[in-house]
Amino acid sequence: MAAQTKVEKVFIRPANSKDIIALNEMRNNNQTLLHLHHAEHFSVEETQDWLENLPSTSKRYVILYSTIYCCRNLVGVIRLDNIDHINRNCMVGLDINADYRGQGLAYPIYAWLFDYLFNQLNFHRLYLEVIANNNKAIHLYGKLGFMPCGNWPSKVFREGHYLDSICYWLNEYVWSLNKVILIEDEKLPRCEVLT
């Protein structure tokens, strides 16, 4: 089972039509839906339409891993939205497949992503939103240097009640203070880009 496999290295590449089925299964997982702002189930066709018709200000990257024993498996997806090259900012997100949660993968993947966005693409600021009951994500964002900047009261209805959506931001200066600690941790899986 995938959850028993310790991931030591992940590969990141742009999402494409070969990823539709795996993306659909990951997106429709009930535990995943509890933490997304939009909790509808989507068909394979709707997922394909979504991926093929992303606006020019959005990008999706899949995260894969492989071992000598198996082919590459979908670990998760990186979401970049509202990409604004003039003001050098964008909204970021990361969804980890339920089979790979709890292995500490979000931390090094975000570290790689932020280093890439700030140092290679010259972004100035990143931001995100998280539902207030997602305590693991909120803890992770604090570890990465994100700072809260407001919230949307009662934005999301889950399990019988309304929850706030908390907004966070991170800029290149704050990231530069945190990144050395993150990237030099030898226990973390490595990330590699595939083209």
Image (cartoon, rainbow, N blue to C red):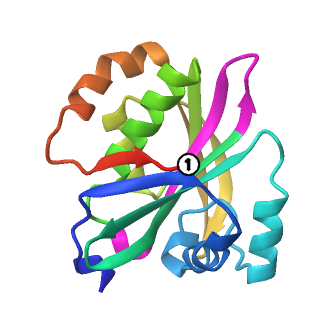
Image quadrant where residue 37 sits: bottom right
Q: Considering only vertical position in the picture, is 95 above or below 70?
A: above
For the residue labelled by badge 1, is the local secondary structure a helix, a strand or a loop?
loop
User: Which of 153/35 is in front?
Assistant: 35
The location of residue 42, given as percent across then percent down, is 74, 78
Residue at the spot x=58%, y=80% of the render?
Answer: 25
Per the rendered image, the range of residues in magenta is 82-100
Image point 36% across, 47% down: which residue?
A: 191
Task: Say whether residue 71 is left or right of residue 45.
Answer: left
| Dot 1 amino acid type | Thr
Q: Could you tell me residue 52's position as x and y percent? A: 81, 61
Q: Is residue 126 left or right of residue 155?
A: left
Quadrant of residue 147 within the rendered picture: top left
- Left or right: 135 in relation to 127: left
- The extreme left residue here reads 186
- Asked whether, in this view, residue 68 is left or right of residue 73, the answer is left
Q: Residues within 10 Å of mark 1 (few under 14, many from 20)?
A: few
The question of residue 47 being in magenta is answered with: no
Residue 2 in percent (x, y) is at: 32, 80
Is 124 in front, or is 16?
Answer: 16
Task: Write down the residue under mark 1.
Answer: 195
Q: Position of residue 101 (x, y in %)?
A: 34, 67
Q: Say above or below: 30 vs 120.
A: below
Does residue 189 lie above or below 121 as drawn? below
